Image (cartoon, helix red, strand yellow):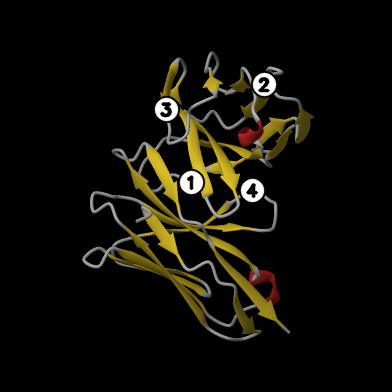
Amino acid sequence: RKEVEQDPGPFNVPEGATVAFNCTYSNSASQSFFWYRQDCRKEPKLLMSVYSSGNEDGRFTAQLNRASQYISLLIRDSKLSDSATYLCVVSRNAGNMLTFGGGTRLMVKP
Amino acid sequence: EAQVTQNPRYLITVTGKKLTVTCSQNMNHEYMSWYRQDPGLGLRQIYYSMNVEVTDKGDVPEGYKVSRKEKRNFPLILESPSPNQTSLYFCASSLQMGLTYEQYFGPGTRLTVT
């Protein structure tokens, strides 16, 4: 089983739709969780950190469920510019290393 | 402008010819790391460095070397490249490692080994 698993998609959604991605992780000792965004052939960029209490940044909401070992990302009112691959990232080794999921590809259509 | 730079951006080389990919950051970050990204395998950590002269292996260190003689630079060395090292490489830096510290990635180096 992979340490961090994501549905690769693609998720094809119309503009304005709400879409949610889940990511499961296997290491119960993981402390830090992040969502990164990666555009085609570009470098990953931090979208948001994921806190135990959940957090929201504009149209984006991230949730952490430690008991079930998954994190989620909800995107409301999807924009064409949201089309990208979303990477779930989990820390390990006392926070010194990061494990990246394979990414979920989102395509927002007009 | 705060950034992580990598050179070269694209490289085609032959098996066995030593090469170095440079990485430099201007943010005075302590933590630096190298990743490779391959289709179906995602990003995998090669080596990381917590600070000057402190380096450690990641998940896929075989065939690679690194050094951290200065805080801003973290070169990746392939002593004898092989075709299975054909990949997209990213360097990243972070103020420190911890709960909320963001990793800043360089633009990537696309390496082809024939």
Q: Earlier in the sequence, mark 1 or mark 3?
A: 3
- Residue A18 placed where, x, y %? 53, 83
Task: Point out the frontmost of discs 2 and 1.
Answer: 2
- Same chain under badges 3 and 4? The reply is no
Foreground of the two, B73 or A69: A69
Q: Mark 1 and mark 4: span between their CA atoms?
A: 13 Å
Q: Quadrant of residue B106?
A: top right
Q: Mark 2 and mark 1: span between their CA atoms?
A: 26 Å
Quarter containing the C terminus of chain A: bottom right
- Same chain under badges 1 and 4? The reply is no
- Mark 2 lies on residue: B20
Secondary structure found at label 2: strand
Q: Mark 1 and mark 3: span between their CA atoms?
A: 20 Å
Task: Point out the frontmost of discs 1 and 3.
Answer: 3
Confirm whether residue B99 shows in the render. no
- Residue B16 placed where, x, y %? 68, 19
Amino acid under disc 3: Lys
- Tell me if B106 is positioned left or right of A22 in this view: right
Q: Residue drawn at (55%, 71%), measured in percent from left and top?
A: A9
Secondary structure found at label 1: loop
Amino acid under disc 1: Glu
**Mark sitting on residue A43:** 4
**Mark sitting on residue B102:** 1
Amino acid under disc 4: Glu
Q: Mark 3 and mark 2: span between their CA atoms?
A: 18 Å
